[in-house]
Amino acid sequence: MSSIAARLRTLPALTGDLPEVDPFSLSADPAEAFVEWLTVAIDAGVPEPHALAVATVDSAGNPSARVVLLTDVRDGCWVFATDARSEKARDLTADPRCALTVYWQPLGRQVRITGRAEHVPEAERRADFLARSPSSRASLIAAHPGESLASVEQMQQAVKRARDRVDREPGLVADDWQVWAVRAEQVEFWQGVSDRAHMRLQYRWDGVRWDRRLVSP
């Protein structure tokens, strides 16, 4: 066993006062159930409860995952934004199938969503960009995802120039800004339990309604 493996085995897991869950007390609609759990996480002070892992595959089937921020849950969709030049945007354009994961560690809760991503209307795309802080908009305008940089200072100067432009043009919206809505086909709610008798509740869309079942962890 390597030294890091030995050290990892000493780390505690599923610590703290984990909430008890009656799985069938959750809404029959997984989006509504998600909002219920998200609200609990926000009220409990979970750090960055809107952090969302997005997994995609490229045209060759190579997987990739990264963390973004969830911006909305509505109409059965989980919504996030990205740059059209980013790897995730290219992947979703080629293959809209994707998987999302949220983990609220202090509550021992995880939610997994799989489905297909679709673009939102232009008005919503623009509104999302303009709702962000001037500093955030400047950073997004200055960025060129994946391109090489000669130094840290190069990016800092690009952000400074972009911030000057944002201040001069407060209605400016980056052409490459995209907002994606993932329409769920399967959603799983996982509640960790200290004795390891974990709870897994799966929702599957059968084309007409959501089928809900409890499964073994």
Image (cartoon, rainbow, N blue to C red):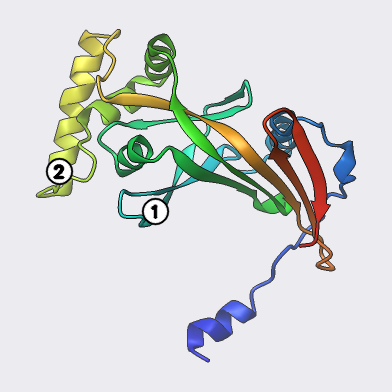
Residue pointed to by mark 1? 64
Is residue 13 among the parts visible in the rendering? yes
Mark 1 Cα shell of 10 Å, populated few (<14), some (14-19), many (≥20): few
Q: Residue at x 47, y 41 (%)?
A: 97
Answer with the quarter of the image where residue 81 lies.
Answer: top left
Is residue 18 among the parts visible in the rendering? no
Q: Residue at x 29, y 15 (%)?
A: 173
Q: Nearer the viewer, mark 1 or mark 2?
A: 1
Q: Disc 2 residue type?
A: Glu
Q: Disc 1 residue type?
A: Ser
Image coords of residue 124 (percent x, y) = 44, 13
Q: Residue at x 41, y 21 (%)?
A: 132
Return the residue found at the far bottom.
1
Task: Between residue 104 and residue 160, name the one nearer to us.
Answer: 104
Which badge, 1 or 2, comes first in the chain's sequence? Answer: 1
Task: Give me the C-alpha separation between circle 1 and circle 2.
Answer: 28 Å
Image coords of residue 199 (percent x, y) = 81, 55
Q: Is residue 74 left or right of residue 133?
A: right
Tag on residue 153? 2
Q: Secondary structure at mark 2?
A: helix
Q: Is residue 66 left or right of residue 201?
A: left
Image coords of residue 4 (percent x, y) = 50, 82
